[in-house]
Amino acid sequence: MQTEQYNSKNDLTAIMVIFGGTGDLTHRKLMPALYNLVHDKLIPEHFAVVSIGRRDKTTEEYNDEIFEALQIYSRNKISESCWRKLRERIHYYQFDFTKQQGYEDLKIFLEELDKKMHTGGNRIYYLAVAPEYFETIVQGLHVSKLSQNAKGWNRLIIEKPFGKDLATARKLNDKLIEVFDEKSIYRIDHYLGKEMIQNIMVLRFCNSVFESLWSNKFIDNVQISLNEKHGVGSRGGYYENSGAMRDMVQNHILQILSLVAMEPPVNLKTDSIRTEKLKVIQAIEELTPEALRDHIVFGQYGKGMIDGALVPGYRQEEKVPPDSATETFAALKLYINNFRWAGTPFYIRTGKRLGAKSAEIVIQFKSLPNVLYFKDRHIQEPNLLVIRIQPHVGVFFQFNTKDFSSHHEIMPVKMEASHINDSLGNTPEAYERLLFDILRGDATLFSRWDEVEAAWMVADKIIAYREQKRFSFPNYAAGTMGPIRAFELLAKDGREWWNI
Ligand SMILES: NC(=O)c1ccc[n+]([C@@H]2O[C@H](COP(=O)([O-])OP(=O)(O)OC[C@H]3O[C@@H](n4cnc5c(N)ncnc54)[C@H](OP(=O)(O)O)[C@@H]3O)[C@@H](O)[C@H]2O)c1
């Protein structure tokens, strides 16, 4: 994808300031991503990391902890020379970001580091902290003028969740936009950093065989499934305020849906792509009370068996109240009311503690009339294009052919694109791609504010419906593929979920 703001070599130099440097995200994702960028020679020479936390430790001690985390979470083995290159760039900085004086001191520290590391005054402020602190930190950066640092560019990176609903998201955005302009705000949706998500556009716009059939005329339905085997574990407190709609649908799933359904952009520039994605979300058909009742299924897991072991139900998880009404599963049927897609259902399914872990998109093409080959006992299998996002990464296409071992039989065969699969493995992690893009100023894989806003408009209505109804939870056992109603949702339309 195209870079818009990357103009000179100097643009790639920067200090990355991580608020939340002692936290889980930094240890599991950010530092391993930085290490792998060093490994792949994508980190510029003039680059430094300042990790902020309240815990009392020296840079030496901090780096020892990071080294241990890298052994567990890095996709590449840790080599001494690469680790040295990263280690000498990382500085631990202890400060409580709720105290304004700390920002003044940080400013002096960063200016000195700039001189030492020749980082050209460019700054990445990465907020790897709980969302309730986003505003405090941005305000601290503003008052201390760290956000207006005129020597170079200043970019703000925001982790999800971006608001709890439309109102809180707008309030947060208003606060951010007072300090950083929209082009400098990078809202992370790590799904967009995944290789196969980026491949959706390539598959569509580089293959006439797919793009010419990519509409309601030839596609029967589209299925997007993000299924997880794990439960909420120790994150029950966070999940209670989130649920599947806020955690997965409002962001990841609607972003994927928009890439699958958008019109070809006029070029590959960031805003051209984001504008087409936005139009898809805006075209999602308004959910009437009947549609909310008939096209939406919520679920919550009870206890059950996962991989041969008994696991507790959601209400028995840590920090979850015994009468919790939070959904751990959602299935939706949506229509996109535009010329290309009117009438073609998009089925969405996501949940925790399901029987299979998979993230995939299935495009089911319309079947041919049963007048020649499929008249009597033959069942026609439809053509399917399956885009596998994780854990397996790849694409396959299903089509019908004659079974050469019999006279009459017709059988479906699967053509696998195995050039990117587990055996080759080790494809870059989403955060590597995203951090590299932040560094070079390419915001294509980040959500623009109007996309986030439009997605909340869709999600809010569905969440409000869930909150006003009292569902009988739990309604699916851990280890199954969700509530029975999720199967009925498709069965009513004469369809089924594809578990490929
Ligand atoms: N973890 C994930 O896999 C993941 C995935 C997606 C999104 N996210 C998002 O990423 C963000 C961070 O999540 P996390 O799991 O990394 O959280 P976490 O483990 O709880 O870390 C929180 C960090 O904030 C710091 N902190 C809190 N209050 C502070 C203060 N007053 N002054 C200075 N530092 C303070 C903590 O430092 P001290 O403990 O040293 O005080 C710690 O480094 C959240 O918005 C979360 O929703 C996380």
Image: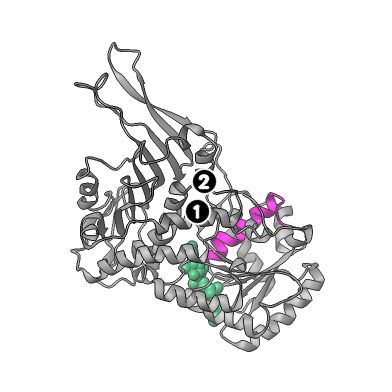
Q: Is residue 99 left or right of residue 480?
A: right
Q: Which residues fall within the magenta stretch?
A: 24-43
User: Mark 1 highlights which residue?
Assistant: 276
Vertical placement of residue 275 versus 54, above or below: above
Instruction: Give amino acid for label 1.
Output: Glu
Q: Nearer the viewer, residue 421 or 246?
A: 246
Residue at coordinates 35% horizontally, 45% vertically from top-left?
223
User: Mark 2 highlights which residue?
Assistant: 264
Residue at coordinates 46% horizontally, 64% vertically from top-left?
452
Give the crowd class for mark 2: few <14, some 14-19, many >=20 residues within 10 Å: some
Q: Position of residue 233 (x, y in %)?
A: 37, 63
Q: Position of residue 70 (x, y in %)?
A: 60, 57
Q: Nearer the viewer, residue 302 or 119?
A: 119
Q: Secondary structure at mark 2?
A: loop
Q: Is residue 321 left or right of residue 177?
A: left
Vertical placement of residue 327 versus 106, above or below: above
The response on whether ligand 1 sits within 8 Å of label 2 is no
* Label placed on residue 490: none
Tally of numbered tags? 2
Residue reaching furthest to the top: 407
**Alpha carbon separation for disc pair 1 and 2:** 7 Å
Q: Is residue 482 visible?
A: yes
Q: Secondary structure at mark 1?
A: helix
Prevalent SS, magenta region: helix
Q: Are marks 1 and 2 in contact (CB under 8 Å)?
A: yes
